[in-house]
Amino acid sequence: MLAANAEMHAASGVDDSMSGTTAVAALVAGAAIHVANVGDSRAVAGVWREGRVVAEDLSWDQTPFRADERARVKACGARVMSVEQVEGMRDPESEGWVPDEGDPPRVWARDGLYPGTAFTRSLGDVAAESVGVIAEPEVKSVEITPPHLFLVVASDGVFEFLSSQEVVDMVAMYEDPRDACSAIAAESYKLWLQHENRTDDITIIIVHIRDSENSGPAGSDKVDYNSGGASIALRTVQAEIPVFVPSEANYLTRCAATGMQSSSSGSPTERSLSCVVPSPTHPLLVHSKISDASKPLQSERAVSHPAETWHQMEGGTEQPVQRSISPASC
């Protein structure tokens, strides 16, 4: 990620002075998943524990909500305030931000109304680097075990109004990962329009994890039963793409995990991964109404105009603000 960030800075056709991106990457190597993350996109595993599928976060959101990240950017000279604090509507020294309020703490330069990022790490964002917004990722490695059922990698637009557990619960409801992707994207879109007058980027990838012992011909079913008689099917609906079908009670049974025991050889090929993109023909049926009291347009970058001119909302209209950028890094 550091190399990609350097390439963006050096590319003549890319102006990343006031633009950039969060990023999360998952690498499967042998029997382990390695996740690197900058910003607040997220990787989550669905793990079978105590009779249900539980969300296991494989990355940490890097935002000013985190005390360690907040202290780090402040040490680089940043101000950390919400938009209302910057505009004088709230005590600028207060740190009592609430995630669900829709006005998160942001990173600001001491001498201006920029960059206004709601995250503390990213790729690009040259102006933000001077106040500690860096491209160095946090890395987490997790061993893949039989209870690991699937992996979800998604942008922050998915997790703005959905928790990791809610996303995992939705994945477990669908036989086809493409349908799960479409359903989660549709739900995210609906929630954005219920809370704001815009939507953020909504991107999601779902990867089913399987044991090679459970591979079978395309279209085949395997059904196991627990002591209570509830069933769970592991169906390969497409070559090398196994999916889990919830029982009638909508719970994955313990056999989902016990039926995927690895051999004792420890070979990296014992467990493999398959993924498909969301079905392009699956409709995103959204029924929502934008409230008259929708919140003002805000984004993760409160200011997104390059060069030396930025705009801020004042009295319902955009007002230009002239500031100079010092490209010095922290």
Image (cartoon, helix red, strand yellow):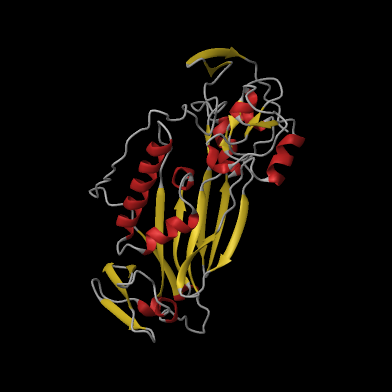
Q: Where is residue 50 in the image (x, y as percent from the top left)?
A: 50, 75
Residue extending farthest to the bottom is 227
User: Is 261 rendered above or below residue 283?
Assistant: below
Q: Which residue is drawn at 57% across and 49% down?
A: 37
Report the quarter where the C terminus lies: top right
User: Is 129 rendered above or below residue 24?
Assistant: above
Q: Nearer the viewer, residue 242 or 100?
A: 100
Report the quarter where the N terminus lies: top right
Q: Position of residue 4 (x, y in %)?
A: 55, 41
Residue extending farthest to the right is 75
Q: Which residue is drawn at 38% across and 37% down?
A: 193
User: Is 298 rendered above or below residue 205?
Assistant: above
Q: Nearer the viewer, residue 282 or 186?
A: 186
Q: Is residue 290 left or right of residue 304?
A: left
Q: In this view, does 223 lie to the left or right of 3?
A: left
Question: How many marks can you see?
Answer: 0
Q: Which of 63 and 218 is in front in this view?
A: 63
Q: Where is residue 181 in the image (x, y as percent from the top left)?
A: 35, 53
Q: Residue at x 55, y 58 (%)?
A: 58
Q: Position of residue 227 (x, y in %)?
A: 39, 87
Q: Quadrant of residue 251?
A: bottom left
Q: In this view, does 294 lie to the left or right of 63?
A: left
Q: In which quarter of the image is residue 270?
A: bottom left
Q: Residue at x 28, y 42 (%)?
A: 287
